[in-house]
Amino acid sequence: MKKTITLDVNGVAETAEVEVGQTLLRFLRDGLDLTGTKEGCNEGECGSCMVLLDGRPVNSCLVLAVEADGRSVTTVEGLSREGVLHPLQKAFLSQAAVQCGFCTPGMVVSAAALLRENPEPTEDDVKKALAGNLCRCTGYKQIVDAVRDAAAAMRAGAVAGGEAGKPAEREEVPA
Amino acid sequence: MSAPVVGTDVPRVDGLEKVTGAAKYTADLKFPRLLHVAVVRSPHPHARVLDVRTDRAARMPGVRAVASGRDFPLHTGIYLKDQTVFATDRVRFVGDPVAAVAAETPELAAEAAAQVHVEYEPLPPIFDVEEGFAEGAPLVHPDLGSYEVVPWIRPKAGTNVCNHLKIRKGDYASALKGSWKVFENVFRVPQVQHVPMEPHVSVARVDLAGKVEVHSSAQSPFTVRHLLAHCFGLPHGDVRVHVPYVGGGFGGKAGINLEPIAVALAMRCRGRWVRLMVDRHEEFFATVVRQGLTATLVTGVDRHGKVQAQKMHYLWNCGGYGGYGVNIVRSAGYTCGGAYEFPNVEGDSIGVYTNRPVGSAYRGFGMQEIHWALEQQMDRVAVELGIDPAEFRLKNCLGAGKSTVTGQLLDEHAGRVDLCIRNVAKAIGFEPDRERTPYRGKGIACAVKAPAMPNDAASSVILKFAEDATLEILISGIDYGQGLMTVVAQFASEALDLPVEKIRVKGCPDTDLSPYDWQTVASRQTWATGNAVFRAASEIRGKLCATAAEALSVPAEELSLRGGAVVHEATGRALPFERLVMGYQFPDGHAIGGPVAAASSYLPEGLLFLDPETSQSAKPVAKWTFGAQAVSIAVDPETGQVTVEKVAACYDVGKVVNPALIKGQTYGGIVQGLGTGTMEELVLDPKTGRAVNASLMDYKIPSTEDVPAEMAVDFVETAQKDGPMGARGIGEHTMIPTPAAIANALWDACGIRISEMPITAEKVWRALKAKERAERGAKAAGEARVPAGTVA
């Protein structure tokens, strides 16, 4: 059975006919070719498929596409805008927090959700927020460092009112 | 000469693609009218296959191809060709592929696979390695004697032994007799899974002209091509393998994996793309795992605390097939003494077939497993002798002028394990007279590893310029996280004095266009591909200078490269690369030179085979990387939970090429080592042979919350003579000593030993209880001496 859904994906209104049993992950990857969101386990255990649904982090393998009808979705592709990186993406580069890169999109998305709620997270806050995002390469240290680094950059940017601190996520996304 | 680039934190050259989501992995590629594969797998650990009937499945709507063992009976395997694409007459583990279906949707493929009828006659399975090794054990491979095998692997027909490497150095028996004290212990390591975040996936098409094209998540595009060509009887030129970005491998994507199944199906539906993607459940047991190990060690020491006699008996649980695992057996043989000099050695490394999942390469290639045994043994001996464990290691460790178990004499360029031991001991506060707190302890362990590869394993590169003088570097080593692309850019930048921004490393190879590389394994890429880059860069330099010399009418030898230009220092004249790389044009219009490019390669020099009886060899491997780790832990006596609070790691890497990247490798290795050391084990149901924890819910790997609060990482730089700027391999070594260091810290914390990995809370709790009981018993008996609680 199919159903037509309309949703906001990275600021673009998308309308599509989807199988009711199709996951949001499948829809993003196969339907919209947004392959930055990865499939690592398809059972909500690894976090590689993390996206923001109305600003909240969800494992898109556990959400049906039809559940996203009328809502807004931010994927890793929506974090940078026209080549301008989100402070988290910059920090992941400068802190060498990327290795194979497969978990990176999910990590960055989960971290973006954290920083939206908590602009000054402690090391423990970051570890807790990213506990559902598995990485087999990095040992996590540089990832945690990168998130705290990005938080500091965003706070500095917010104080200065400059571009640096402005996350590229859509401000119009309802919380 | 501009500022050095090697030795600095150059950001990953593939980083931008990865943080934006632009990087494409195999499952991200789009193919028109893609077919999906479901594999029919054996539910039995060991059975005869009496009949496979695929006709009903083949007739189902949407099914485009069905293949089974009788269609493709050819053998494959990188060293020992003991496996067919699909099981033919016998299945050897739960998950062994028997047939496969390609259909228009994954659901149709799964439905059709369920309609393939296989008739089995169950045979008694062997899960235990000692059982498989015992005389008269049922044979897992009755045809072992007829398999094709490389000359340096020695299977024993009529047994389950797929390889046996013997080390005989000095006179072990006499030395043991002459020893002051003798210690014997047994250690065990279970099978574990690599758990790369990206599960295995391969896509294949056979076009109407018969050419095979494969896209695969693989560590070894050329080895995949080579083995596919062999397996399907095709010329290499008709097989093309692409490897896009790879989401982690850790050895599990080395050699050949899913590719033959995808190709077999593609042959039966020519013109269509066929994709085989295992899910996370299958990833745990149907793809390769790390081999299990049972190690028996005997150590004889003299009165001065020097080991005189050392026996090492390694029994490897290879699982159902040993195509790749046989070389781990070999590697563990010629490295059987670890980081120590043992004058009299009896070493046996023996690979045994069982009916468990297939053992294969896993980061460390057998070294974490043997170090689990060796480093605990050394610790036990030290403690028993009342010698500080760090001091005991220093007394016995390898170094310049010492000889390895194969009789190789190390020179001053070989790397300094002694400095690594001192470094981590200091970093963790491992002083013999340190203050003791109950249930808190410190432990230390060493590590050594050489690249385990054929003596002629080569890497090559192509360097060429784009019109704007961007240097393009083609490599076929895979950067699946370790940073190879970045390191290659740094080496080329250094060699040609060209800014990294002017370099593009093409790191996703295509065997039709990219230069040959054996495999991305063995921590060999920085070293082998790095050497090839310097050779090719030297050729590029020669070509640029020759053209510039003619253009400037100066001798070529007076020219140098600086910041992307050829410079004549004496006159201050310079030509930017842009004016040279496509050829230089004189004012009158005539042109010289031409598009500048160079190809070069590197093959390890002077490696010698091992003696077949004693394995003595003056140069069995290209290089050794030594290191050590020390940990401090806290034990919760109520729950047995071990918390690793700090890890100090130090390796002699020859040259730190990129500090940020090498730290990342080390943090990653430590945490992966902590995973196998304290959490991970692939558990099979002893009755059915099925994996009972084949999911990320039941098989836990470390998360952010398991990371030690502190990781102190340091490096020694004793230049490797044949290394690029002195560099040697490090990727795998970082996870080798962690579990043993934790185990040794456990003794230090509370006087218990866990000899079977992993050190779970349950095992610790049981050992603590056993120790309490023993202490109570001893007290009751009025004895002063307290025996240590030990749990197998």
Image: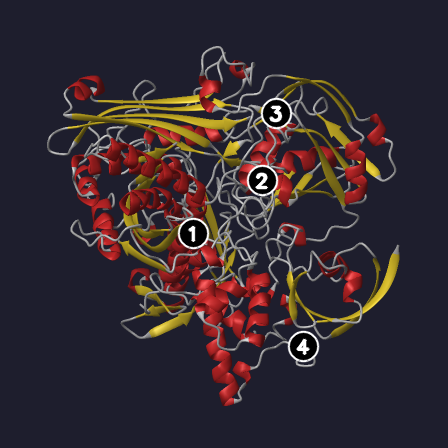
How much space separates mark 4 and mark 1, taking CA atoms?
35 Å
- The residue to which callout 4 is attached is A175
Q: Is A1 situated left or right of B587 in this image?
A: right
| Pointer 3 or 2: first along the chain | 3
Query: Looking at numbered disc 4 in the image, what kind of residue is underneath it?
Result: Ala
For label 4, the crowd category at 10 Å Cα-Cα, with few meaning under 14, some 14 to 19 and many 20 or more, is few
Cα distance, mark 2 to mark 1? 21 Å
Chain letter, disc 1 residue: B
Q: Secondary structure at mark 3?
A: loop
Position in image of residue B609 (x %, y %): 34, 26
Q: Quadrant of the C terminus of chain B?
A: top left
Considering only vertical position in the picture, is B255 above or below B674? above
Disc 1 residue type? Val
Residue drawn at 18 percent across, 52 percent down: B431
Check the image and report above or below for A107 versus B62.
below
Q: Are the residues under marks 3 and 2 on the same chain?
A: yes
- Does the residue at mark 1 contact the one at mark 3 (Cβ under 8 Å)? no
Quarter of the image for residue B168 reads top left
Which residue is denoted by mark 1 in the rendering? B671
User: Which label lies toward us, 4 or 1?
Assistant: 4
The answer to whether residue B242 shows anywhere in this view is yes
Residue B693 marker: 2
